[in-house]
Amino acid sequence: MAGARNSLLQSGRWRGWEYPLWALAFALPLLLPRQALIINEIAIVALFAVALDLILGFSGIVSLGHAAFFGMGAYAAALFAKLVMPDPLLGLLVGVAAAGLLGAICSATILRGTDLTRLMVTLGVGLILMELANKLDWLTGGADGLQGVVMGPLLGRFEFDLSGQTAAWYSMTVLLIVFVVARRLVHSPFGATLKAIRDNRLRAMAVGIAVNSRLSVVYTVAAAAAGAAGALLAQTTGFASLDIFEFHRSADVMLILVIGGVGWLYGGVTGAVVFKLMQDFVSGITPQYWTFWIGFFLVVLVSVGRERLIRPWTWWRRAAAGGKS
Amino acid sequence: MLTILFDGIAYGMLLFILAVGLAVTMGLMNFINLAHGAFAMLGGYITVLLMQRMGVPFLACLPLAFAGAALVGALLERTLYRPLYHKPHLDQVLFSIGLTFMAVATADYFLGSSQQMVQLPQWLKGRTELGEGPWMLGMGHYRLFIIALCAALTVGLQHVLTRTRFGSRLRASVDDQRVAAGLGINVNHVFLGTFAVGSGLAGLGGALGAEVLGLDPSFPLKFMIYFLIVVAVGGTSSITGPLLAALLLGIADVAGKYYIPKMGGFIVYSLMIVILVWRPQGLFVRKGGS
């Protein structure tokens, strides 16, 4: 018992290099004030990827519709700011709560069936929400997007400025909070049971883990975290549009996670940095055909092997004989 | 009302031809292939280009669309798909999304993002009406042609699957790959052949559907969900399952769009989720399969 506790605590402890890393991240908007907008975007996307990692990397649920919760958070926060009050923190909470509620409802749909069924159901939820946002145009502005969202100052003091420094710090703080929570979660006994379910569901059930309730809880948490990311996007850009429900977004975030590494919380963050910089670079050259290069990258990534791409020295060795199937 | 039913059936038949290849390959290799729509788009573009640039008649284009898509399918199967059969589903999903994105961007680059039009021959353009009042049945000739062709193909496929040697090999491989290989069936060849025919059928469906569904570079993404619904709801162990699912989907979609246009695709997606939560393996499952 003590051994198990120690091994869990050991892996969950903060390493020395992590403090300067976060300190540097927080100093970035100050060091590069011109890049504050993209830093803000990266923080949001990283948050979204961390949310997806909770269910994809740690629980093994292949979801193609996580943008549903992202969008839910964004629309909830934007509507709250527009119709009720412009305070950002309350809006963030509303976005998180709305997405979490939706996640709790949807978690009932992902408990049964095969990977294909789950893929379809998550995709379907995303599409339904997109249809809803499109058709309820008196509320959401339909295809034109929800315009005229004005945010109040953060904590009643810090205005969101055009250069985006406040926004970057705001998003980064939320990212750090969610990151710490997620880290606690995956290194807790609860997280260990999630990994057990991911690796072998039948055995997990046999040793007495309540598979369904664990999956529901983690799905809800991941949905709420994605909602936080969506709320941040809506608040810092002052805009919410149908585009956030698009299939593209779910696929992109999956790609981000895979670039960084699945089942590793820093994977989402690393992936977000690499992806956004790459996007910035490539769309500077060919703005229109960015999707081709994403696609190409995905095909190469999978053909070479996800684990091997970040370790070039293994490329010329023979692949280890087949994975589990 | 009958007209809507008729259009729904035509639409469903078309979806079936588009998706049947996906159903068989998914059942056979347990491979989640989201790039199936790209083959359909390829078939559609082959037809459009041949007709516009070279003046090939419509009917002659159909087999060419089939052959072109089948050839590309076989090439890709051999080079890119085969190493991925035993990878986790996440890898397969990523790979096929990547392939889809590439297809979309390539089509956009070479052919522009506008809708492509198909000039149907004169004899397919008309419309026959039977009866009158609420029970009037209006049949577009082209839709009639689609139904006839797809029905013939379905019967042919069913015959191949149940009566021929290739069909029994295929069914054996679907049920249990290892035992089939142990009995001396060259499972790789069966896979290759099936994949090529499945892609070819998608190409044919794309060619036929260019007029009904519209054809532009976002085709694979737009219809991906429909193909997947057919497969997920119909199950992958037979071809009658996907056929019924495709008909159901076609009729529900056409009727939904006609009677409650405000709801759009809402009905179809909700129906799918309800069905999948209720019966996660699909509606029509053959017992004893894998």
Image: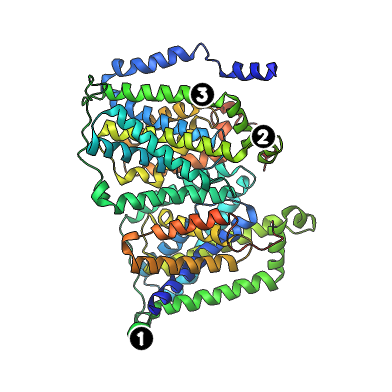
Q: Residues within 10 Å of mark 1 (few under 14, many from 20)?
A: few
Question: Could you tell me which quadrant the N terminus of chain B lies in?
Answer: bottom left
Q: Quadrant of residue B88?
A: top right
Q: CA distance from mark 2 to mark 1?
A: 66 Å
Q: Chain of mark 2?
A: A
Considering depth in this image, is B223 or B188 the residue closer to the camera? B223
Q: Mark 1 against mark 3, which lies toward the viewer?
A: 3
In the image: residue A246, left or right of residue B193: left
Considering depth in this image, is B160 or A92 the residue closer to the camera? A92
* Vertical side of A23 occupied by A110: above or below: below
Asked whether the residues under marks 2 and 3 belong to the same chain, the reply is: yes
Q: Are marks 1 and 3 in contact (CB under 8 Å)?
A: no
Considering depth in this image, is A181 or B112 the residue closer to the camera? A181
Q: Which mark, residue B129?
A: 1
Q: Which mark, residue A183?
A: 3
Q: Give the residue at the far bottom of this rendering.
A: B131
Element at badge 3? helix
Q: Give the residue at the far front of this rendering.
A: A84
Q: Amino acid at mark 2?
A: Arg
Q: Which mark, residue A318?
A: 2
Q: Residue B275: give x, y in percent of width and height.
A: 52, 58
Q: Chain of mark 1?
A: B
Q: Residues within 10 Å of mark 3 (few under 14, many from 20)?
A: many
Element at badge 1? strand
Query: Can the viewer see residue B111?
Result: yes
Residue drawn where x is 61% and y is 25% of the image? A189
* Vertical side of A40 occupied by B100: above or below: below
Which mark is first along the chain, 3 or 2?
3
